[in-house]
Image (cartoon, coloured by chain):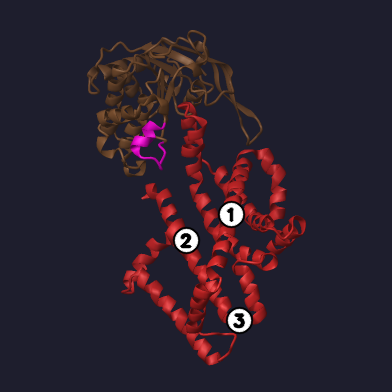
Amino acid sequence: MTGAAALDIRIDRKTFRMPANGGSRVAIEGLALSVPAAQFLCIVGPSGCGKTTLMNLIARLDREAEGTVQLSDGTPVESARIAYMFQTPRLLPWLSVRDNVRIVLDQAEGAEGRAEALLRQMELGDSLDDFPNRLSGGMQRRVALARAFVTEPQLLLLDEPFVSLDLPVGNRLRGLLLDLWRARPTTVVFVTHDLREAIYLADRIVFLSRGPSKVILDETVGLTRPRDVEDPAIDRFRIDLLERHSSLLHGLAGASGDQTPGAVQ
Amino acid sequence: MSRSESAPAGTRAGLSAPWLRLASFVLLIAVWEASAVLAQSRVLPDPWRVALTFWDHLLHGSLLWDLGITLLRVIAAFVLAMICGTALGIVMGQRKQVDVILDGWLILFLNIPALVTIILCYVWFGLTEVAAILAVALNKFPNVVVTIREGTRALDRELLEVAAVFRVDRRRTFTQFFLPQLYPYLMVSARSGIALIWKIVLVVELLGRSDGIGFQIGIFFQMFDIAGLLAYTLAFVIVMLFIEIGLVEPMERHMTRWRK
């Protein structure tokens, strides 16, 4: 099975039990989202709004919610090859760089060479036999990115993968991600709270409200590709967006152009 | 870890760690020799006598045979206790209900004296090899369960999520994502296990076997042959030392090489 997956997400209600007081907290409510095949979608929302919760629901790491996550043809999302890059690299410290990437491949595929080729392409050829602890934070992210791409996923999930990196290292990884994505088109859902990053990367940005989260704005990014991180058009797009929706990044739809009045609290 | 801490201390004193170890060992022998000379008693032979007795038993006695048979019992009981203890420890660490049900039993077993387990095994299963090995393994088993349960509770769920999302098969999830997280706990279990087991094996042999180090020590006791007793003890301690240095330590180094 090749090609990118088109995704239909409908979370009616996702609650967490609060062990402290025995009550429960609604994390997501009435969130509907369709992602066409091979689209690069960024999800932007304030911290703690339930972005990671949403990603775990899409990845099916968490299955306890009212609603469905499925492919557009109605098959369960599990029938697609999924890759997930987490906020921390989550590499296995006892495996070498090479084995960390190889471990997610089926042994039957004879894909021994594929992991190595990808790592070399990502300039990790000199570190194949190193353990992750010896690598810098940026290099560990690169290994995690290689692991995400090596399976040629039909759906790629990234949850603030470049957070806590300094700007040049982060930008290099963002560029690398776009290069890889262009070479191996796949559907991408990328979570971030950095609007600039989202505009640089995405075809489309979806903004979430504060918890319980739902979609408050759905914006297409029409900038041409390939893009340059330094391109002033990115900042112009950002400023324009924030002028139209001033409290967007606080999880509130702006006063003007408010598409979902119900979200204003 | 202790080695890296003691090394700088050794250089400060002008002696490296291995030489200090040797010096302290020589001191021990000297204290022994001095005590034996002062006591002039048959029940405290000097080191030289013990060494001669050791040599004599090695060449003309059954020392090697006894050593071998005891070692086999140690290995059998160790493997049995480790495998069963690890399996139950994992289950109890993962399943809350099983843990609640079996926790009381575990505390009970932890507090049954070794001697009682040994006697009961012999009484119920006869003075057989199986009963002997079972008695030893049963003494170690609850400790393994407790340690591995602790390790299983401390597992990093985030790494297991990686395996789940990338659909790594069950076998590799277990061997590459799960088990390596338990290595430190397995090593602790194995180390304390070997130390505990070989001491209990001697008691088991003393009470119900007709060969092995423990059985011979019983004979020496009856004949008041302290030189023989010490010779046998030394032989076994040396073997266990080699197991520690030649087997356990390299294994541990291999398993933790990624930490450097």
Q: As rendered, which of B156 and A166 lies closer to the eye? A: B156
Residue that badge 1 annotates: B76
Instruction: Mark 3 vs mark 2: tell me if same chain.
Output: yes
**Left or right: residue A239 compared with residue A4:** left
In the rendered image, residues at marks 2 and 1 fall on the same chain: yes
> Distance from label 3 to label 1 (Cα)?
30 Å
Q: Is residue B138 magenta?
A: no
Q: Quadrant of residue A110?
A: top left
Q: Is residue B256 visible?
A: no
Answer with mark 3 or mark 2, whichever residue precedes in sequence.
Answer: 3
Disc number lying in front (3 or 2): 3
Q: Secondary structure at mark 2?
A: helix
Q: Nearer the viewer, mark 2 or mark 1?
A: 1
- Residue found at x 33% / y 70%: B16
Q: Position of residue B206 (x, y in %)?
A: 66, 68
Q: Quadrant of the N terminus of chain B?
A: bottom left
Q: Chain of mark 3?
A: B
Residue B213, by quadrant, is bottom right
Decide if residue B217 is in sight here.
yes
Residue at the spot 56% in from the left edge and 58% down from the top edge: B72
Res B225 label: 3
Dot 1, how many residues are within 10 Å of its Cα: few (below 14), some (14-19), or many (20+)?
some
Q: Residue A130 — which label?
A: none
